[in-house]
Amino acid sequence: MITIFIRTLVIYLALNAVMRLMGKRQIGELEVTDLVTTLLISEIAALPITDQDIPIAYALIPMVTLLILEVLSSMILIRFPKFKALVSARPTVIIRNGRLNQKAMLSLRISMEELMSEIRQQGYPDLAQVQHAILEKNGKLTVLPKAQFAQPTNEQLGVKAKDEPLMHVVMCNGVCNAPGLKLIGKDRRWLEQELARRGYSADRLFCVTANDAGQIFLIPKQEIQQTDGGNRS
């Protein structure tokens, strides 16, 4: 039992390290080579866990080899973009200038029900409202509406709006989040002073977010939230 636990722990840590080095792309955004590598690594990683007669090295060596191949192939594709067409799909225009490309739909094996479902999920109930629809290489559908159905921008409405600074988590469950403070150019001392000025202690707070303009949003813990709620200042 202990042997199985140790082998599983080693494979788990190695698999996390390999996937971390491969990058942060989501499954839906994986290239074909990325997806193949991910599937192979998952299969290889399971072998020494399910079969104790297989040495752990028999899984670690192929995983590292696949990682090296993946990194090298990514570098080659970036350096020589022409090769990318061999292993990567290209965006396909399904609707152009309001006209449906039936040939593209047949080639992609997409039914009208699937297309309508994707369009509805992006907030357009009628195909006639769509000016362009493009199936991106990651499998997601980009929908651009006709001008009369598009949401007007502030510029079009003549409204002047200022950009709001981005909020970051600077404390969670009473624990200071140093990376979040660094992103807004503040430090722990600044945060402690701000909380003290508002009459809060770290142990009373569930989460604290702040931005580089000095604005803070406080979320008290559940038992206090019944009376205090969120507090932004």
Image: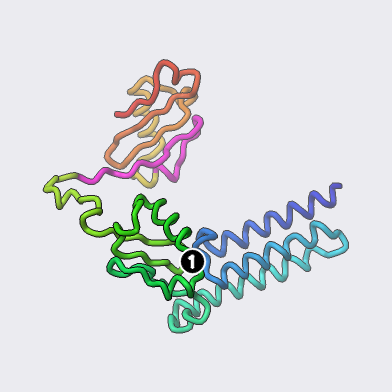
Q: Position of residue 34 (x, y in %)?
A: 57, 69
Q: In the image, what residue type sits under mark 1? A: Ile
Residue of label 1: 110
User: Is label 1 in a helix, a strand or a loop?
Assistant: loop
Q: Position of residue 152 (x, y in %)?
A: 20, 50
The residue closer to the viewer here, 186 or 122, is 122
Q: Position of residue 16 (x, y in %)?
A: 63, 56
Image: magenta residue range: 162-181
* Residue 23 as seen in the image, left or right of residue 147: right
State the quadrant of the C terminus: top left
The local crowd at label 1, few if under 14, some if 14 to 19, many if 20 or more residues have their Cα within 10 Å, is few
Quadrant hosting residue 27: bottom right
Q: Indicate whether residue 178 is drawn in magenta.
A: yes
Q: Position of residue 2 (x, y in %)?
A: 84, 47
Which residue is pictured at 18% across the width and 48% down the height? 154
Which residue is pictured at 50% across the width and 80% down the height? 76
